[in-house]
């Protein structure tokens, strides 16, 4: 029986850089959520380990042992086989954790297929700093280099419009261009009952990687301006190290309207409206 896992886009609603370790990695304090748009990973029993990459964003994604899905499989069990198919819908090197979310989905799918326990989140950081938070995709506060996770108060229902202006921004280059590495941590996170109060809270936070990314790639500034000009957009900000930016919306109709308008006016851009995925506790409440 094949097993399938959804690999949702990761969105950093806020990302403060609070320090730098001796090995060069940066210390972060970030509010991370996931969006209802992503890749799909299927795994079925097979003798050897193989990977096919399909889908609208497959071009340029490595298919060999360097793909994070293959590296995740080898981390879980260096000896076992499976036939893996990765259906790519997220742009790569885009600040929305595409490869990391794929790796986490592979760990979930293969743990089930092979009857193994999931590794501890911290142990998966060797695959990438975003993999631990993607292992159990729900709203989290992410600290350390990405390996220290904590719970956040319930977030309100909200919609995200994700916009990638079609230019890859390499994460190391953005960190290198960062002027100050001693930012303040996130303030305490209170309960927000609606999207406008979440936007107000986020306005008191920042993405410290946004200024260096804008310096390296002016299209980020263009994407932020285009999002911010959409009716109903409560906040526009860059995710991760860019270049994908998100707009926060209270209602689906506004988000869908903004996505349609942006896709029409910028045909080369990747634009998607998606629900901000709730935490497990909220999802349970919503279905009962
Ligand atoms: C910026 C974020 O997207 C925020 O969620 C992540 O921290 C990046 O996660 P990622 O893409 O999985 O990152 P990795 O593949 O582990 O690292 C890529 C490069 O980014 C830099 N890097 C990454 C994470 C971190 N905490 N400090 C860093 O300085 C390092 O130069 C590293 O070589
Ligand atoms: N499954 C995968 N999907 C996409 N890229 C992959 C994958 N595996 C390895 N890569 C390589 O990783 C690089 C980074 O891609 P990824 O989509 O993880 O972006 P990212 O911007 O680093 O994400 P973030 O910084 O938000 O974690 C790509 O340029 C690609 O060569």
Image (cartoon, rainbow, N blue to C red):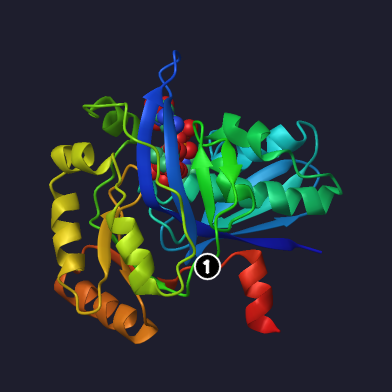
Q: Is residue 53 above or below residue 93?
A: below
Query: Residue at coordinates 24% horizontally, 29% vertically from top-left?
Result: 178
Task: State the image quarter where residue 160 is shown.
Answer: bottom left
Q: Furthest-top residue in view?
A: 22
Task: State the image quarter where residue 70 is shown.
Answer: top right
Helix or strand or loop: what does disc 1 sit on? loop
Residue 288 can be seen in this image: yes
- Give 235 or 107, whichever is nearer the viewer: 235
In the rendered image, residue 273, in percent from the top left (x then y), is placed at 37, 73
Task: State the image quarter where residue 118 is shown.
Answer: top right
Indicate the quadrant of ligand 1 in the picture: top left
Query: Residue at coordinates 49% horizontally, 64% vertically from top-left?
Result: 191
Query: Callout 1: 10 Å neighbours few (<14), some, many (20+)?
Result: many
Q: Is residue 215 above or below residue 254?
A: above
In the rendered image, residue 48, in percent from the top left (x then y), is placed at 76, 41
Query: Residue at coordinates 71% horizontally, 51% vertically from top-left?
Result: 108
Query: Residue at coordinates 30% horizontally, 82% vertically from top-left?
Result: 254
For label 1, the residue is 277
Position of 243 with respect to 250 (left or right) is left
Position of 259 with respect to 8 (left or right) is left
In the rendered image, residue 126, in percent from the top left (x then y), is placed at 59, 29
Position of 256 with respect to 6 (left or right) is left
Residue 45 can be seen in this image: no
Q: Quadrant of the N terminus?
A: bottom right
Q: Quadrant of the C terminus?
A: bottom right
In the rendered image, residue 30, in percent from the top left (x then y), is placed at 43, 45
């Amino acid at each position: 029986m094949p097993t399938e896992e959804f690999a949702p886009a990761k969105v950093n609603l806020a990302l403060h850089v609070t320090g730098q370790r001796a090995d060069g990695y940066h210390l972060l304090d970030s509010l991370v959520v996931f969006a209802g748009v992503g890749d799909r990973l299927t795994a079925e029993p097979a003798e050897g380990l193989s990977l096919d990459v399909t889908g609208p964003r497959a071009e340029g994604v490595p298919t060999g042992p360097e793909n994070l899905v293959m590296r995740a499989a080898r981390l879980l069990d260096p000896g076992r086989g499976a036939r893996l198919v990765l259906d790519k819908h997220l742009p790569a090197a885009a600040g929305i954790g595409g490869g990391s979310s794929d790796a986490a989905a592979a760990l979930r799918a293969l743990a089930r297929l092979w009857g193994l326990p999931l590794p501890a989140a911290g142990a998966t950081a060797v695959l990438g700093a975003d993999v631990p938070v993607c292992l159990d995709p729900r709203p989290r506060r992410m600290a350390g280099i990405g390996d220290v996770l904590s719970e956040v108060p319930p977030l309100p229902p909200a919609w995200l419009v994700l916009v990638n202006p079609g230019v890859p921004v390499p994460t190391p280059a953005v960190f290198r261009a960062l002027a100050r590495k001693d930012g303040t941590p996130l303030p305490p996170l209170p309960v927000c009952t609606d999207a406008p109060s979440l936007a107000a809270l986020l306005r008191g936070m920042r993405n410290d990687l946004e200024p260096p990314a804008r310096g390296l790639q002016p299209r980020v500034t263009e994407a932020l301006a285009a999002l911010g000009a959409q009716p109903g957009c409560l906040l526009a900000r860059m995710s991760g190290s860019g270049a994908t930016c998100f707009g926060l919306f209270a209602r689906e109709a506004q988000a869908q309207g903004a996505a349609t308008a942006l896709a029409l006016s910028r045909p080369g851009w990747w634009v998607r409206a998606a629900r901000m995925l709730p935490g497990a506790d909220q999802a349970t409440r919503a279905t009962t």
